[in-house]
Image (cartoon, rainbow, N blue to C red):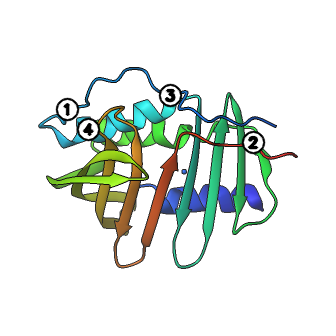
Amino acid sequence: MLKFLFSSFLLTLLLSITACNTNPNKSSQSAFTLDTDCNKNITKAFEKLIETSMFLRVSENAKAKQEIMKINEQYFTRLDGEEWEKLEEDPSNIYKSAIEGIQSGDIKIADCKVEGSKTLNGVETHMISYKREMAFSPEFVLTSDMKFYIGKGDALPYMETEKSTSINSKTTFQYKNIIAPKI
């Protein structure tokens, strides 16, 4: 049942022993410059997320809060503050699917524009907005207004908001001070 909820929750929101006090995901201090192609900015951020050794992704909407954690090839999830459960599959796979969907045109990105900059938890980010269209079936096409916050220094995603007729969600990403749950 939890696996079904996990898959359903991720699908709906898509389109998130060890303590670390530093960011293990820093690959360089050079600034990330936005590309003129919005699709490239989004896929670049997802690629960086997939490559990172650890993250905590928190997705919330009116019905649920889901947390997903990746720490050195270990994966965990919990729904609405319940007990953490270990995942066998890498949760980054949802972002691999998103990249493939954007590149193939199955996920359509339109009206993309840079809204400016915003500091989130001490990290300076590029804030971009766009419309995303995903067809789940010929009868059900979800069009959402998205805001995506990409780190200026590391190109990682830090926040994503989605608004549509059926979804109003916020997803945040954290890359340091993450502690693996004891299971």
CB-based contact (under 8 Å), mark 2 and mark 4: no
* Residue at the (65%, 45%) spot, across then down: 69
The foreground one among 85 and 135 is 85
* Residue at the (32%, 52%) spot, across then down: 119
The residue pinned by badge 2 equals 180
Gap in angstroms between the C-alphas marked 1 and 2: 32 Å
* Residue at the (63%, 56%) spot, across then down: 67
Gap in angstroms between the C-alphas marked 3 and 1: 18 Å
* Mark closer to the observer (3, 4): 3
Q: Residue 33 carries which label?
A: 1
Q: Which mark is residue 41?
A: 4
Left/right placement of residue 163 relative to residue 70 reads left
Q: Which mark is residue 25?
A: 3
> Residue 35: x percent and y percent?
16, 34
Element carrying mark 2: loop
Q: Earlier in the sequence, mark 3 or mark 1?
A: 3
Q: Which of marks 4 and 1 is nearer the N terminus?
A: 1
In this view, 26 is above or below 7: above
Q: Which amino acid does label 2 sit on?
A: Ala
Gap in angstroms between the C-alphas marked 4 and 1: 9 Å
> Residue 80: x percent and y percent?
69, 69
**Quarter placement of the N terminus:** bottom right
Gap in angstroms between the C-alphas marked 3 and 2: 16 Å
Q: Which amino acid does label 3 sit on?
A: Asn
Q: How many labels does the image show?
A: 4
Q: Earlier in the sequence, mark 3 or mark 4?
A: 3
CB-based contact (under 8 Å), mark 1 and mark 2: no
The foreground one among 145 and 8 is 145
Residue 141 can be seen in this image:
no
* Mark closer to the observer (2, 4): 2
Residue 99 can be seen in this image:
yes
